[in-house]
Image: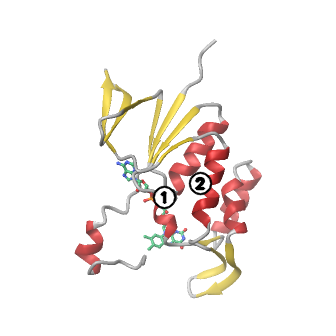
Amino acid sequence: MAGVLKAVITGGGWSGVSAALRAKKAGAETVLIEKTDLVLGAGNVGGIFRNNGRFTAAEEMKALGAGELFDIMDQCAVHTNVDFPGHEHASLYDVNTIEPCVRKLLLDSGIDLMLESHVMDIVKKGSDISAVVLDDGTTIEGDVFIDTTGSSGPMGNCLKYGHGCSMCI
Ligand SMILES: Cc1cc2nc3c(=O)[nH]c(=O)nc-3n(C[C@H](O)[C@H](O)[C@H](O)COP(=O)(O)OP(=O)(O)OC[C@H]3O[C@@H](n4cnc5c(N)ncnc54)[C@H](O)[C@@H]3O)c2cc1C
């Protein structure tokens, strides 16, 4: 019988959190590596959800058995079913309370959460990735590697295009 597979997910934003929960539910030993001291990434600066077509997406996820993150967003919502320009029936979660709730879910689910751990490199065996390498030289081996490091670019972009701040803070 095959052993338990190990999933190594790099980047603890909403994507990485979701990937980690799915991997764990599928039976994998799961490690989520995040370079900051918070999960949720850019999700800590914007909280609009269930707006427009996302309402259906949220309900679909719940119906498919992957609704635990939407349940937390609903619990942390400070506004529900509001309309404003460009957004209909939106909810907004409280960015000050949601991170600890999501972090607790990850830990309660048995996910190995590594905060303040910056992935700098990979190790390859042939054409396959066999490990990621952290900035302190630690290697984390695994069977499946998922990159959810986001696409918004480094904070340098805020300096370059936003005079020190885009709109987050
Ligand atoms: C100002 C602002 C407001 C927004 N408002 C909303 C909104 O109201 N509603 C909405 O739905 N969307 C909103 N968005 C978009 C939404 O926040 C993003 O699409 C979403 O959070 C992206 O999630 P992600 O997990 O893909 O990436 P990210 O949130 O970028 O997460 C990537 C994570 O990877 C980590 N990481 C990166 N490199 C490494 C590495 N080498 N090693 C370890 N960790 C690493 C980062 O620290 C980060 O935590 C907003 C975005 C911004 C910037």
Tell me how the rendering is colored.
Answer: secondary structure
What residue is shown at x 72% (from left), y 67% (from top)? Answer: 75
Q: Is mark 1 within 8 Å of ligand 1?
A: yes
Circle 1 residue = 38
The answer to the question of whether label 2 and label 1 lie on touching residues, with beta carbons closer than 8 A, is yes
Q: Alpha-carbon neighbours of circle 2 within 10 Å: few (<14), some, or many (≥20)?
A: some
Q: Amino acid at mark 2?
A: Arg
Residue 104 placement (x, y as % from top left): 64, 53
What residue is shown at x 46% (from left), y 65% (from top)? Answer: 42
Residue placed farthest to the bottom in the image?
85
Residue placed farthest to the left in the image?
160
Mark 2 falls on what kind of element?
helix
Classify 7 as above or below 80. Answer: above
Residue 162 placement (x, y as % from top left): 29, 79
In the displayed structure, does residue 24 sit left or right of residue 169? right
Classify 86 as above or below 52. Answer: below
Q: Amino acid at mark 1?
A: Leu
Residue 54 placement (x, y as % from top left): 63, 67
Disc 2 versus disc 1: distance between alpha carbons? 8 Å
Residue 84 placement (x, y as % from top left): 61, 87
User: Which of the 4 image quarters holds residue 53?
Assistant: bottom right
Classify 38 as above or below 164. Answer: above
User: Which of the 4 image quarters holds residue 126?
Assistant: top left
Mark 1 falls on what kind of element?
loop
Tag of residue 103: 2
In the displayed structure, does residue 77 sit left or right of residue 144? right
